[in-house]
């Protein structure tokens, strides 16, 4: 039985960059619906006792009837929980020292990172997600369609932004580029990304 995680900040804490109204709808309605639907779909199945990550990996290739719908709801639950952690009041701006070297190496600096993140997000057709991931020792920017998640591709997400219109329509209408710029300048939780990166580096060094 999965439960909707509480937001790691107050609903109004990201305003004016992301309004309380957006968060109330996005977290309280959209994310909640994925969690409730997932619980309904796995009730009485072999997936019921499994962890969210196990369910995502087991259903990603959608071999069995019903797996696609379970994957979509499980992955959207995971992606949204990750997205809330990717946001912070007074976020954005400069990255932190622990990640700066890797950002420089992979993107030629923070400005290069922001440009590529913006291009990937704006160029992504339709609904989905844009991610900063760690894969094979390098940082990469990728986008995934609909509910798809880098977790299912064996990549370690460090930061993400939701590209579904429900994430930005109330605050930015159809202006996705403006939303992404606001995410990068005011909301991106670099502390979270750096902690994820450091944990991954420790695992690989073992
Ligand atoms: Mn969403």
Image (spheres, rainbow, N blue to C red):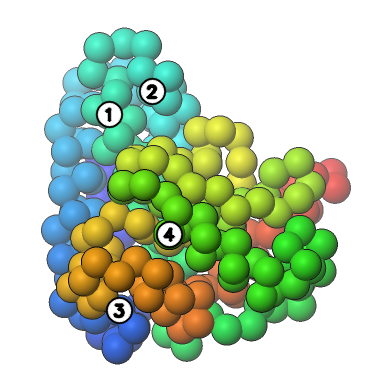
CA gap between label 2 and label 4 equals: 29 Å
Q: Is residue 23 left or right of residue 146?
A: left
Q: Quadrant of residue 58?
A: top left
CA gap between label 1 and label 2 equals: 7 Å
Label 1, ligand 1: CB separation under 8 Å: no
Q: Are marks 4 and 1 in contact (CB under 8 Å)?
A: no
In front: label 4 or label 3: 4
In front: label 3 or label 2: 3
Can residue 27 be seen?
Answer: no
Element at badge 4?
helix
Q: Which mark is residue 59?
A: 2
Residue 51 in percent (x, y) is at: 41, 35
Q: Which mark is residue 117?
A: none
Q: Are marks 1 and 3 in contact (CB under 8 Å)?
A: no
Name the residue at the right extreme: 205
Residue 94 in percent (x, y) is at: 64, 83
Q: Is residue 202 left or right of residue 142?
A: right
Q: Which residue is mark 4?
A: 122
Element at badge 1?
helix
Q: Which residue is mark 3?
A: 18
CA gap between label 4 and label 1 equals: 28 Å
CA gap between label 3 and label 2 equals: 33 Å
Element at badge 3?
loop
Query: Residue shown at 42%/19% (left/top)?
Result: 61
Is 22 situated above or below 38?
A: below
Earlier in the chain: of badge 1 and badge 2, it is 2
Task: Determine crowd level at label 1: few under 14, some 14-19, many 20+ residues with C-alpha closer than 10 A.
Answer: many
Residue 3 in percent (x, y) is at: 25, 50
Earlier in the chain: of badge 4 and badge 3, it is 3
Q: Which residue is mark 1?
A: 70
């Amino acid at each position: 039985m999965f439960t909707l995680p509480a937001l790691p900040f107050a609903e109004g804490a990201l305003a004016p960059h992301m309004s309380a109204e957006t968060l109330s709808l996005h977290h309280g309605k959209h994310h909640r619906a994925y969690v409730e639907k997932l619980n309904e779909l796995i009730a009485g199945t072999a997936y019921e006792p499994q962890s969210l990550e196990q369910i995502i990996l087991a259903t990603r290739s959608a071999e069995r009837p019903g797996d696609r719908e379970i994957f979509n709801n499980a992955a959207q639950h995971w992606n949204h929980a990750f997205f809330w952690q990717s946001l912070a009041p007074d976020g954005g701006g400069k990255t932190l020292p622990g990640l700066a070297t890797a950002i420089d190496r992979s993107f030629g600096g923070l400005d290069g990172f922001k440009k590529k993140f913006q291009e990937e997000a704006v160029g992504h057709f339709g609904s989905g997600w844009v991610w900063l991931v760690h894969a094979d020792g390098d940082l990469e920017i990728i986008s995934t369609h609909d509910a798809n998640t880098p977790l299912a591709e064996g990549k370690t997400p460090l930061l993400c932004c939701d590209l579904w219109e429900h994430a930005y329509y109330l605050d930015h209408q159809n202006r996705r580029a403006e939303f992404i710029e606001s995410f990068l300048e005011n909301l991106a939780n670099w502390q979270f990304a750096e902690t994820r990166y450091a944990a991954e580096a420790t695992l690989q060094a073992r």
